[in-house]
Image (spheres, rainbow, N blue to C red):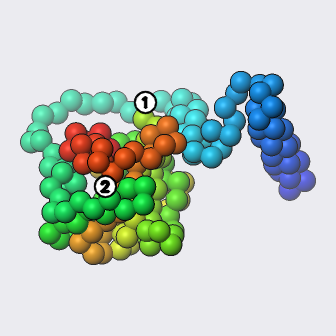
């Protein structure tokens, strides 16, 4: 595809999104465009659309020991900003709790080195104060994939469900239920 064609497609797409969001503001259209664009749902929708083109991998049922969830065994739990700082006895690997898409890796003032994953179930989980990243932005992850490594013995966790952060008091239950 020529560069002119790519630019024309990009401009048409941008004008479409901006135009639809303005129509949504005036309540002339019922499509939640701003919700898709601001919460990362656009990436999940695109991922599911592309996945629908590919054949599903064959699933083989196996039995084994139950998986230990290290996030269940924290030492202390301190509410912080829209999430919580959770401390552990030793640094550990931060793994994906389901299928999803890494939507951010970088540095923020609030949580230092940070990685955010938009899971297919709609939850957006942010892990902050990590030591090193194991994935790049816009990388698809599945259950058990390593996302980052803790450097310290504490990590910041924020969970957004439907674009709204869960209360820090609910995070402990969320983590112990394995619903990450």
Element at label 1: loop
Which residue corresponds to the image point at 39% horizontal and 45% vertical from the top-left? 166
Q: Is tag 2's residue or tag 1's residue first in the polypeptide sequence?
A: 1
From the image, tell me which residue sits under label 1: 56
* Residue 168 relative to residue 41: left or right: left
Question: Residue 71 lies in what quarter of the image?
Answer: bottom left
From the image, tell me which residue sits under label 2: 95
| Above or below for 108 versus 69 | below
> Does residue 154 appear in the picture of this structure?
yes
Report how far apart the C-alphas of labels 2 and 1 lie in the structure: 23 Å
Element at label 2: strand
Between 169 and 163, the one nearer to me in the picture = 169
- Image mark for residue 91: none
Q: Position of residue 158 (x, y in %)?
A: 40, 54
Which residue corresponds to the image point at 85% horizontal and 43% vertical from the top-left? 15
| Above or below for 70 versus 38 | below
> Does residue 16 appear in the picture of this structure?
no
Which residue corresponds to the image point at 39% horizontal and 33% vertical from the top-left? 57
- Characterize the local packing of mark 2: few (<14), some (14-19) or many (20 or more) Cα atoms within 10 angstroms: some
Between 93 and 31, the one nearer to me in the picture = 31
Between 137 and 157, the one nearer to me in the picture = 157
From the image, state whether disc 2 or disc 1 is nearer to you: 2
Which residue corresponds to the image point at 47% horizontal and 68% vertical from the top-left? 110
* Residue 60 relative to residue 36: left or right: left
């Amino acid at each position: 595809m020529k560069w002119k064609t790519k630019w024309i497609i990009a401009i048409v797409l941008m004008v479409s999104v901006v135009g639809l969001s303005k129509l949504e503001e005036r309540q002339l259209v019922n499509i939640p465009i701003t919700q898709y664009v601001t919460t990362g749902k656009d990436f999940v929708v695109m991922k599911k659309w592309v996945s629908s083109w590919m054949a599903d991998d064959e699933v083989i049922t196996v039995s084994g020991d139950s998986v230990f969830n290290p996030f269940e065994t924290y030492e202390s739990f301190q509410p912080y900003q829209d999430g919580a700082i959770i401390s552990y006895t030793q640094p550990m690997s931060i793994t994906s709790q389901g299928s999803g898409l890494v939507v951010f890796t970088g540095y923020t003032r609030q949580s230092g080195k940070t990685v955010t994953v938009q899971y297919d179930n709609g939850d957006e989980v942010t892990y902050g104060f990590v030591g090193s990243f194991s994935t790049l932005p816009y990388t698809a992850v599945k259950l058990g994939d390593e996302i980052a490594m803790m450097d310290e013995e504490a990590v910041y966790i924020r969970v957004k469900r439907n674009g709204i952060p869960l209360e820090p008091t609910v995070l402990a239950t969320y983590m112990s239920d394995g619903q990450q």
